Image (spheres, helix red, strand yellow):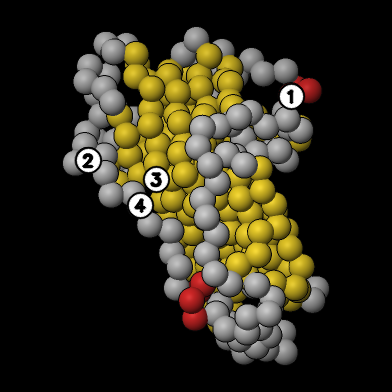
Amino acid sequence: MAVLALVAPALLATTLSQPASAEGADPATGPGTVVIKSEPGVVTVTIPDPSVKTKSQAASTVPTQPQLAAYVGNNSASHCSINVPPCKFNIFKTSSRTITPPGGSSGALQSSGTALVDVYTVTGCCFTKADYYNTNSYSQWGGTSPFNASSVKHEDIWDIDYLGVGFSFGGSPSGTINLGSGRLSYSNTRSNTWRVDHSVQHIYIAAKAGRVTKVKYEAHGSYGFGSTFYTTDAYSSVALP
């Protein structure tokens, strides 16, 4: 959330049709998955193979943080300094709940996501940009009765708090929504499945003529069982010194 944002109202809550390019290639998908959307070097969206009638493999897959140098923090920037770049940390969160859908048996809903954040540092001044690399996330229904939900929606949100006159961003998949005030949303909804995965290569959000004070990430799930819907919401934020 910006303290001061001079962003034109027409730019807020608009769908971006042209994704910026990003370095690297899409990660390989594992067995038992079906790619439903792919922008090479930008994003891969997958669901479980509908012909596979087990959840044991995919259900145990939880995004893991990269194994990096000791100066990389986990949901913390306490090691960062404007005088000694770089400033890097893993940002991640998982949220779960147990529900009993209408006519079914109890099971777990879960949303989870992780990314490596590299904060650009103007030495001796301030932090000005947050680069999110390798955002890997999912939302899933882990129960077996019913095996699939009527629908699963999975959403990533990348967000910064900043002091400045506005913000800029890039690298986002097509269909990303600019929510304003340094906040971006990307989501996909699929019918008759139990899980949706996102793998986003790289996006950035930068403060214009200002500084970034906090870096945030969210993973959200919405699950339909007929006319009944449930949600899971995972929030993580890292304050910059």
Q: Residue 91 carries which label?
A: 3
Of the residues under marks 2 and 1, which one precedes in the sequence? 1
Mark-to-mark CA distance, 2 and 1 = 39 Å
Mark-to-mark CA distance, 2 and 4 = 12 Å
Q: In which quarter of the image is residue 176?
A: top right
The amino acid type of the residue labelled 2 equals: Ala
Q: In which quarter of the image is the C terminus?
A: top left
Of the residues under marks 3 and 4, which one precedes in the sequence? 4
Residue 222 image offset from top left, x and y in percent: 66, 62
Mark-to-mark CA distance, 3 and 4 = 8 Å
Q: Quadrant of the N terminus?
A: top right
Callout 1: SS: helix
The amino acid type of the residue labelled 1 equals: Leu
> Can the viewer see residue 88 in this picture?
yes
Mark-to-mark CA distance, 3 and 1 = 27 Å
Q: Which mark is residue 65?
A: 4
Q: Which mark is residue 69?
A: 2
Question: Circle 1 sits on which residue?
Answer: 11
Above or below, 156 against 105 in this view is above
